[in-house]
Amino acid sequence: MPGAIYAEGLVKTFGDVRALDGVDLEVPEGTVLGLLGPNGAGKTTTVRCLTTLLRPDSGRAVVAGLDVLKQPDAVRRSIGLSGQFAAVDEYLTGRENLQMVGQLYQMKAKAAKARADELLEQFNLADAADRTAKTYSGGMRRRLDLAAALVVSPPVMFMDEPTTGLDPRNRQQLWEVIKQLVSGGTTLLLTTQYLEEADHLAHDIAVVDHGRVIAQGTSDQLKARTGGERVEVVVHDREHIPAASALLDKYSLRGLGQGDTTVEEHMRKITTPVSGGAKLLAEIIRELDADGIEIDDIGLRRPTLDDVFLSLTGHVAEAKGEDDDGAQEAEGHSKGHRAGKEAAK
Ligand SMILES: Nc1ncnc2c1ncn2[C@@H]1O[C@H](COP(=O)(O)OP(=O)(O)OP(=O)(O)O)[C@@H](O)[C@H]1O
Ligand SMILES: [Mg+2]
């Protein structure tokens, strides 16, 4: 029995670009999968294929028990989608936008209005409810788009970068909304540029690169895969970098696939993967001291999801549009899409 979202061997090419090169995914019912990957990895394309907006060249997908290629209309009725680019109607007010979605889903006018009010409140849009969306900032549009995706609570939700462009407070509130949603049994696939968000919300994380899932597991599993602890030393004098680096290299765990000692010159920081914890740290401090190497800082670090991402993809995760209301506006509408509005190509 496949999960609430299941994909096998999804391939999608755009001319020469192989956007998806055999994506396999499975999201058990009632869980959250975080899709992580560098820009252009294929996250949005995956979401669009799974939500019937785009027809894959090959592969198979089942969403909410329905075959995405054979039963696209039924799939659309069973899912909610909020896209990377907000798909609000800018000539309607916030409230009208939400009521319209409710009516599209055959809600009675009164129920649609009540639901709209509830969401406007939840997404901090009550004050702006009766202004046309045209006057909204980027972050407000984003919130309206998310609210629209939540008018009805479908069993399976897709959110493509739901919190890009939201300020920290609105992001936190959205996390709460998402948690509530999932505790009610909704299955969610979300893409994000914020590793912290995936760490916080997702049961499972799939890392996508070049159109393939290159790793999947819980945040802890992925961190364990990336290797254990590292020692980080910040030397006081730049001239001591080579000596300290040579010293740390002796303690380095090689063969982790992670490489050895790394130096960040400008920060005077030397990092090396180790095992041995606090005891080792004490030994390193003694040795640095004996060699007359003065340090500003030393610490034992466990891998973060950022480290995982970096070691798997060779890219640093880019957070874009943070706190930048309005930055999205240029892209806002031309690319807007939502299940049902756009036919599969
Ligand atoms: N309609 C299209 N026509 C041509 N190429 C496309 C199209 N859609 C996506 N691509 C290409 O497919 C690849 C994957 O794009 P996709 O939008 O899925 O990436 P992404 O992981 O969502 O990236 P981002 O983090 O920037 O949102 C990219 O190389 C992109 O340029
Ligand atoms: Mg994308």
Image (cartoon, rainbow, N blue to C red):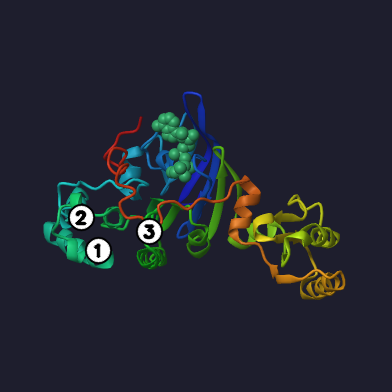
Residue 315 vs 234, above or below: the answer is above
In the picture, residue 271 is in which quadrant? Answer: bottom right
Q: Earlier in the sequence, mark 1 or mark 2?
A: 2
Q: Earlier in the sequence, mark 3 or mark 2?
A: 2
Look at the image and tell me in which quarter the C terminus lies. Answer: top left
**Which labelled disc corresponds to residue 64?**
none
In the picture, residue 274 is in which quadrant? Answer: bottom right
Residue tagged by mark 2?
Answer: 98
Q: Mark 3, residues whose alpha carbon is within 10 Å: few (<14), some, or many (≥20)?
A: some
Residue tagged by mark 3?
Answer: 323
Q: Is residue 225 visible?
A: yes
Q: Earlier in the sequence, mark 3 or mark 1?
A: 1
Residue tagged by mark 1?
Answer: 119
Q: Are marks 1 and 2 in contact (CB under 8 Å)?
A: yes
Q: CA distance from mark 1 to mark 2?
A: 8 Å
Q: Is residue 55 visible?
A: no
Where is residue 99? Give x, y as percent: 17, 55
Q: CA distance from mark 3 to mark 2?
A: 24 Å
**Total numbered circles:** 3
Q: Residue at x 34, y 45 (%)?
A: 85
Residue 266 vs 332, above or below: the answer is below
Left or right: residue 72 versus residue 30 is: left
Left or right: residue 193 versus residue 295 is: left
Left or right: residue 103 versus residue 206 is: left
Q: Are marks 3 and 1 in contact (CB under 8 Å)?
A: no
Mark 2: secondary structure? helix
Where is residue 117? Give x, y as percent: 19, 65
Q: Residue at x 15, y 46 (%)?
A: 91
Q: CA distance from mark 3 to mark 1?
A: 22 Å
Where is residue 150? Give x, y as percent: 30, 57
Tell me the amino acid under the disc marked 3. Answer: Asp
